[in-house]
């Protein structure tokens, strides 16, 4: 039996650090929360590289006394909790007393702190959790803690860190979430000497959101407030017209703490039901204020997950608040439209009134008074002479007046553009699977387009007999060769495919009759599969289209990092994205099949798939992105679709060329005649 050993304290600290310090971003979260608990009004975060080599957090909080600074880095040393009764109502961001101990055990730390009102401060230096030096020093009121060389003594953890760019993006995202949760605190984030964001700290949620998330998102948000049974919800949600391709812009806060909550996420999206397009997600910044005894924040080491004692009440609060905000927006839009319509002046009632000839002569066509003679007399001329119509650019002689003495005269005197044709009874057969033969009147041969007035399209009956009475089919073939070719193609197609397109239901499903079956085909899924197969067959770069007006993109730090890391892959798939300022990018080209309106949502979905990184190979990752490109480029449910487009989709499905959409969903569902008869109780 193995011998049981008691681990050394420093080994236990290093193991415990794995629960709290996963990466440099975890250090920033813990230090910023300590600054908030200290009552800071201004917090500055500085990192170098990806944060693994240098992190500094400075605040103007209450600071620490020398004796407190000496024990702050011991395990389970905290000023926020005294006994077990404090666990029932935790009001602070931190309470376990493990953060500083865990951070110091895997890094080098330098602490400068000065309590408010003290004449001097304290400087503390630690190496892997051991205090090396502690001396009095001069420093501003508050605390400044510098963390260097994270995981220097745990190489196994160090090698799992990502690139500096990725780690810096995670640090920026973490700091931004902390800043969003505290609008009353001014937060400044500096990366490699460059300021990335700054929040004003004026206590207003709107200005905090505007400065941290940007103007593009802030201008699409609508206010959302509700209160019920001691629960209070405030914040903003996005308009349904501004849906996004992923959930990266959803921020939930409970008592100022950023949390991950599938329950709150579900309540939010349920509130948008029937208001948001499928595949689009709302953005939000929601602040939930709840009594400390009704929420348990001690269910996760990083305190990012919480548990509510009354989950249904919280769900209902968020759901009804979202529904109310969306309904108020609809009412506001309708009121604005109504007021705009009232502001438009009514046109004059007599503006389009017709005028008779006599009224025109009386009111608008008055002859001028004859001029007084002074040696000679001039002819009277009207005050207004209507202009003559301009002569046509192509001159022709008008046809003589028709004579009704004989059929021959009536035929030869027909004006240009009209003809008297012999009665031809022709009914093309019913077409199955292709376009019916066009009507004869829709085709004109080159001979017909050059004929003169005296050359009718068809000769009179008497003249036909003199010309050996050609067959009607010969006349049809002569004048409508294209229609004859289509007729032959239709006959051949009807022999190959015995199906008939009945129509389209709900602008989504194509109804097809095939033998004894009724097929319902999802047009979006079918078109998506066709585009995906075509794109996947291209081994090289996918054809792209340059945009006349480039599309600006504002991405969060994590998405920006993914775009830069996968630039070559995106370029191969038809996306040309360039940096365009701080956290700003510009889209100059996109795949040829995609509409410009779908480009931003496609980029967001691609970033989400790259973030998950579930594809095991490069080809699998390429296929995942092609799924998104094909989905955005395909025709959508609810669109009006041309008949010829429906025929192409039906042909591909019925022939068995495509069977499933790229996501694995079926393209068609069949109902046999027997199943339909059973539904209508025609048979038992």
Image (cartoon, rainbow, N blue to C red):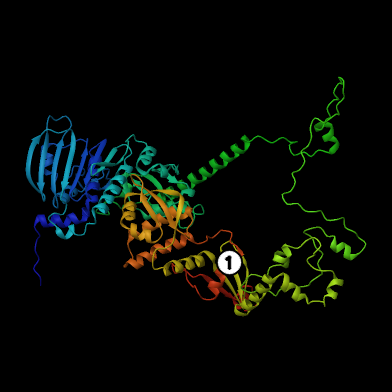
**Residue 172: percent from left, percent from top:** 28, 47
Q: Quadrant of the C terminus?
A: bottom right
- Tag 1, which secondary structure? helix
**Position of residue 189 measured from the top left corner of the image (x, y, whole percent):** 27, 42
Q: Quadrant of residue 455?
A: bottom right
The part of the image, by quadrant, that contains residue 211 is top left
Closest to the observer: 636 or 289? 636
- Foreground pick, 606 / 675: 606
Residue 57 x, y percent position in the rendering: 21, 42
Instruction: Say which of 25 and 645 sits in front.
Output: 645
In the rendered image, the residue lying farthest to the front is 375
Q: In the rendered view, would you say 91 is above or below 303?
A: above
Q: How many marks?
A: 1
Give the percent coordinates (x, y) of residue 120: 12, 32
* Residue lying farthest to the right in this orientation: 405
Q: Is residue 228 visible?
A: no
Question: Farthest top residue?
Answer: 374
**Residue wearing tag 1:** 646
Taking 643 as reference, is 578 left or right? Answer: left
- Please identify the quadrant where the N terminus is shown: bottom left
Q: Few, some or many C-alpha atoms within 10 Å of disc 1 (few <14, some 14-19, many ≥20)?
A: some
**Residue 128 visible (yes or no):** yes
Kindly identify the residue that appears in the image at 10 percent across and 55 percent down.
9
Relative placement, left or right, of 412 versus 55 is: right
């Amino acid at each position: 039996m193995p011998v049981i050993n008691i681990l050394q304290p420093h080994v236990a600290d290093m193991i415990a650090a794995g629960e709290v310090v996963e990466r440099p971003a975890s250090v920033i979260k813990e230090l910023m929360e300590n600054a908030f608990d200290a009552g800071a009004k201004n917090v500055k975060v500085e990192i170098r590289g990806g944060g693994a080599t240098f992190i500094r957090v400075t605040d103007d909080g209450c600071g620490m006394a020398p004796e407190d600074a000496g024990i702050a880095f011991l395990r389970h040393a905290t000023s926020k909790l005294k006994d077990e009764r404090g666990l029932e109502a935790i009001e602070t961001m931190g309470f376990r007393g493990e953060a500083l101990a865990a951070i110091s055990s895997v890094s080098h730390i330098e602490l400068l702190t000065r309590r408010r009102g003290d004449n001097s401060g304290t400087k503390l230096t630690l190496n892997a959790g051991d205090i090396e030096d502690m001396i009095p020093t001069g420093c501003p009121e508050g605390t400044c803690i510098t963390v260097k060389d994270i995981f220097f003594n745990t190489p196994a953890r160090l090698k799992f860190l990502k690139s500096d760019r990725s780690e810096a993006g995670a640090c920026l995202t973490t700091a931004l979430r902390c800043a969003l949760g505290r609008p009353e605190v001014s937060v400044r984030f500096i990366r490699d000497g460059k300021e990335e964001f700054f929040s004003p700290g004026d206590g207003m949620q709107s200005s905090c959101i505007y400065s941290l998330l940007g103007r593009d998102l802030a201008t699409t948000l609508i206010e959302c407030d509700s209160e019920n049974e001691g629960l209070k919800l405030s914040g903003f949600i996005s308009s349904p017209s501004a849906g996004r391709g992923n959930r990266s812009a959803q921020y939930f806060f409970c008592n100022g703490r950023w949390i991950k909550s599938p329950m709150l996420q579900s309540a939010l999206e349920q509130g948008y039901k029937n208001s948001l397009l499928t595949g689009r997600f709302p953005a939000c910044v929601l602040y939930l204020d709840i009594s400390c005894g009704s929420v348990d924040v001690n269910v996760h080491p990083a305190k990012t997950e919480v548990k509510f004692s009354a989950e249904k009440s919280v769900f209902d609060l968020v759901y009804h608040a979202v529904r109310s905000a969306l309904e108020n927006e609809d009412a506001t839009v309708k009121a604005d439209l109504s007021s705009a319509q009232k502001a438009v002046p009514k046109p004059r009632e007599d503006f389009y009134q017709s005028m008779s000839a006599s009224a025109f002569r009386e009111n608008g066509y008055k002859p001028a008074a004859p001029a007084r003679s002074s040696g000679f007399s001039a002819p009277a001329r009207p005050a207004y002479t209507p202009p003559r119509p301009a002569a046509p650019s192509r001159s022709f002689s008008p046809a003589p007046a028709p004579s009704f003495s004989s059929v021959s005269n009536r035929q030869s005197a027909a004006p240009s553009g009209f003809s008297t044709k012999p009665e031809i009874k022709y009914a093309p057969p019913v077409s199955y699977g292709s376009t019916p033969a066009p009507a004869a009147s829709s085709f004109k041969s080159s001979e017909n387009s050059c004929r003169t007035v005296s050359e009718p399209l068809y000769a009179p009956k008497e003249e036909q007999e003199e010309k050996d009475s050609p067959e009607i089919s010969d006349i049809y073939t002569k004048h409508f060769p294209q229609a004859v070719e289509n007729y032959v193609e239709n006959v051949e197609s009807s022999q190959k495919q015995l199906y008939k397109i009945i129509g389209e239901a709900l602008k989504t499903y194509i109804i097809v009759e095939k033998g004894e079956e009724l097929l319902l085909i999802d047009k979006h899924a079918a078109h998506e599969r066709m585009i995906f197969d075509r794109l996947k067959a291209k081994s090289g770069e996918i054809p792209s289209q340059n945009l006349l007006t480039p599309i600006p993109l504002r991405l969060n730090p994590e998405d920006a990092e993914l775009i830069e890391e996968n630039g070559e892959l995106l370029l191969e798939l038809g996306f040309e994205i360039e940096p365009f300022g701080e956290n700003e990018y510009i889209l100059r080209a996109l795949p040829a099949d995609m509409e410009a309106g779908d480009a931003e949502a496609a980029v967001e979905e691609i970033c989400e798939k790259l973030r998950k990184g579930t594809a095991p190979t490069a080809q699998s990752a390429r296929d995942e992105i092609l799924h998104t490109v094909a989905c955005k480029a395909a025709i959508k449910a609810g669109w009006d679709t041309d008949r010829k487009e429906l025929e192409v989709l039906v042909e591909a499905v019925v022939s068995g060329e495509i069977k499933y959409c790229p996501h694995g969903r079926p393209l068609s569902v069949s109902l046999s005649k027997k199943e339909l008869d059973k539904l209508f109780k025609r048979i038992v």
